Image: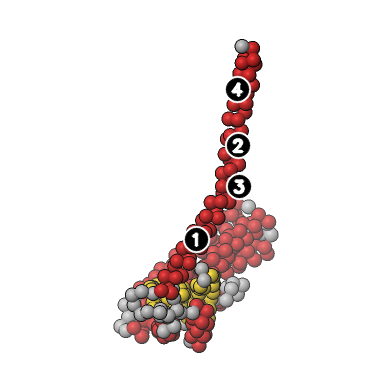
Amino acid sequence: MAKQRRLILSFVLVVLLSGCKREEATDSSVSALAKPSSRGEVMQTSSETVKAMGQTSSDSSPAAAPPIAAQPSRMVVYTGDMQLIVKDTGAAVRAIQEVVIANGGYLGESRMWREGEVFRASITLRIPPERLRVVLDQIRSQAKRVEHENLSANDVGSEYVDLQSRLRNLRATETELRALLSTIRERSRKASEVLEIHQHLTAVRGEIEQLEGRAQHLARTVALATVRVELVPDAIGTPVVVGGWEPVATFRNASRALILLLQRGADIMIWSLIYILPAVLLLLLPVGFVVFVARRVRSPRVRST
């Protein structure tokens, strides 16, 4: 039993040492990519490196999930948000959707709600990065004016390369643990030793799945930019008088103020009948009872005199 435990500890130590050597080799390859002679050499060399990493992982672990597709070292995630003033919210949503679909994207999320007498909308667009500028220009053309617009870019290439390196090492460790598990099953056939190796194998498999999920998420966010667009209808369709006095807007504002006043008056009446009046009655009952008792006590004295 002690001999088998020493064998297991020796194997784990060898695996850790081999993992450290692989990390050093990966760091040296990444540092070699950091100072190429031209940008074209950077893209070609990094692509070949990531491709070789994926092939090594798939060959070393047949039971593991398929390796993630190779990606260039420069991976940019684009996100943005816009607020547009439009004449017709529904028509603007349909027009923007047609523009996005025509450029290879899709409408990720759409929400419309009524605010007073008009509709507002919020939509999330997924757009190919190479068509992002064209789509944004066409979306602006659908608006009367742009209230604000933000666009950000985040390079996640180094994180993706690091994930691929860690996945390669973990898959190699998983393969070696599976081989050791088979050897122990054939030779010792002790449940405690098999269980110990199986626990190590389960922990490694869990780390692999987490890293694979993160890498796949990065690949999806890089493939399509995310832009959130908020559509706000104009206060009035066409003003009666250009500039200065706008009677239609004044009429709408006055109508809304009157309705709000009536609503508040009705709320006050409802609160008075349901809450304030019963509360006042509850407060007056003890006072009335005290006055009644006081009168009853005084009345015999008055009669006796």
Residue 297: image location, x then y, percent: 62, 19
| For marks 1 and 4 on the same chain, the one whose residue lies earlier in the sequence | 1
Amino acid marked by disc 1: Leu
Measuring 61% from the left and 33% from the top, which residue is drawn there?
285
Marked residue nearer the N-terminal end (2 or 1): 1
Residue under label 2, please give it. 282
Q: Image quadrant of residue 300?
A: top right
Circle 2: residue type: Leu
Name the residue carrying label 1: 260
- Element at label 3: helix
CA distance separating discs 3 and 4: 31 Å
Mark 3 vs 2, N-terminal side: 3
Q: Quadrant of the C terminus?
A: top right
Nearer mark to the viewer, of 3 and 4: 4
**Which disc, if any, is residue 274?**
3
Within 10 Å of disc 1 (Cα), the crowding (few <14, some 14-19, many 20+) is few
Give the SS element for disc 4: helix
Disc 1 to disc 4, how far (Cα)? 49 Å
| Residue at x-position 65% and y-position 59% | 194
As measured in the structure, the alpha-carbon distance from the residue carrying label 4 to the one carrying label 2 is 19 Å
* Quarter of the image where one finds residue 161: bottom left
Say whether marks 3 and 2 touch (CB < 8 Å): no
Graded by Cα atoms within 10 Å as few (under 14), some (14 to 19) or many (20 or more), the crowding at tag 3 reads: few
Residue 20 at x, y percent in the picture: 44, 65
Residue under circle 4?
294
Q: Residue furthest bottom?
A: 102
- Res. 289 visible in picture: yes
In three-dimensional space, the C-alpha distance between marks 2 and 1, rounded to whole angstroms, equals 32 Å
Is tag 4's residue or tag 2's residue first in the polypeptide sequence?
A: 2
Q: Earlier in the sequence, mark 3 or mark 4?
A: 3
Q: Which mark is residue 32?
A: none
